[in-house]
Amino acid sequence: MNNERRTTLAEYVKELQSKGRIVFDAEEAVEALDTNRGAFLDAAQRLQKRGLLISPRKGFYVVVPPQFASWGAPPPSWYIDPLMRQEQQPYYVGLLKAAELHGATHQAVMEFQVLTSKRMPRIRAGRNLIVFYYRKEMASIADAIEEVKTDTGRMKVSSPALTALDLVRYGKASAGIDNVATVLADLGPKIDSDQLAFLSLRFEKPVVQRLGYMLDILDRRSTARKMHEMLMSRGNPPWTELDRAEARDPLFAPDPVERDQRWRVVVRRHPEVDE
């Protein structure tokens, strides 16, 4: 960039946008502007106060295009990939957000949900809320992470099979068993049964059992068949509750209405699918 022509951070930001970029880091800007860090931070703060710039992480900046001024920030999909590269962490967009991206749009998703191997605090960026969920072993499920195009580049998203398993594993993030069942009803046709079976070996047995039971009651028994074979190849699993939250308090937990022999799941209330 031409330092003689550009003298302010605002001009630098405009030039980035003209080249299709909306993110930059502090070091890059300081060098490009041939200034010092203190002067840059003062200028960045002024642009943030004017709603032209946000800083979701220290040293990382996102330009707010005019069409998103009322939202206070562009969609997280526009910058999540460079943000995670800045953090030097593997990641994927998952859970309800991934299900939405795969066409399960039954309910509005209030969080932009990201799974990563680093414990990270949530980010409030304008009206958007980015929430990070910790996953220790990222390499073991790498083959089930897909790259999808965004308006500004690409981002990583869990496949339908990985999304289904994660929805059960991270039950609170998925808004409970009824919501999981509703989302699975939409997501089911897109789940690859071979990939699901392979991935199930990387998940805890109770997660596999619960997902298998729900796929069965959603008339997706064929999708879960190979996963069931894989589960049984690991030995007959112990019985598990379909909804641990409901079973946790013996004073309020209803008596079981079903004991599913195929998946060895105790059901105290059948999931309700939102039609």
Image (tube, rainbow, N blue to C red):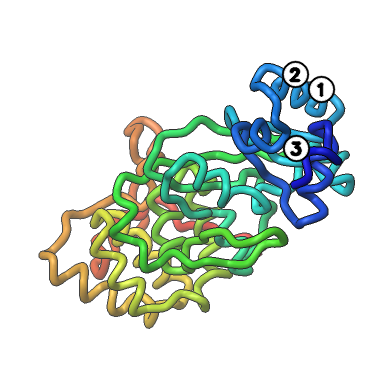
Position of residue 245 measured from the top left corner of the image (x, y, whole percent): 40, 39
For residue 63, say whether it is visible: yes
Q: According to the image, label 2 marks what residue?
A: 42
Query: Farthest left residue?
Result: 235
Q: According to the image, label 1 marks what residue?
A: 46
Spatial CA span between label 2 and label 3? 24 Å
Relative to 53, does residue 220 appear above or below in the rendering? below
Position of residue 6 measured from the top left corner of the image (x, y, whole percent): 83, 38
Left or right placement of residue 95 versus residue 61 in this view: left
Task: Judge depth for marks 1 and 3 and give the one in front.
Answer: 1
Q: Quadrant of residue 272?
A: bottom right
- The local crowd at label 3, few if under 14, some if 14 to 19, many if 20 or more residues have their Cα within 10 Å, is few
User: Sequence order check: which comes first, mark 1 or mark 3?
Assistant: 1
Task: Judge depth for marks 2 and 3 and give the one in front.
Answer: 2
Q: According to the image, label 3 marks what residue?
A: 127
Front residue of 84/173: it is 84
Q: Amino acid at mark 2?
A: Asp
For residue 246, say whether it is visible: no
Secondary element at image label 1: helix
Front residue of 97/231: it is 97
Residue contact between numbered discs 1 and 3, judged by CB atoms under 8 Å: no
Task: Judge depth for marks 1 and 2 and give the one in front.
Answer: 2
Q: Quadrant of residue 259?
A: bottom left
Query: Farthest front residue?
Result: 4
Left or right placement of residue 113 versus residue 109 in this view: left
The residue sitting at 38% across, 50% down in the picture is 169
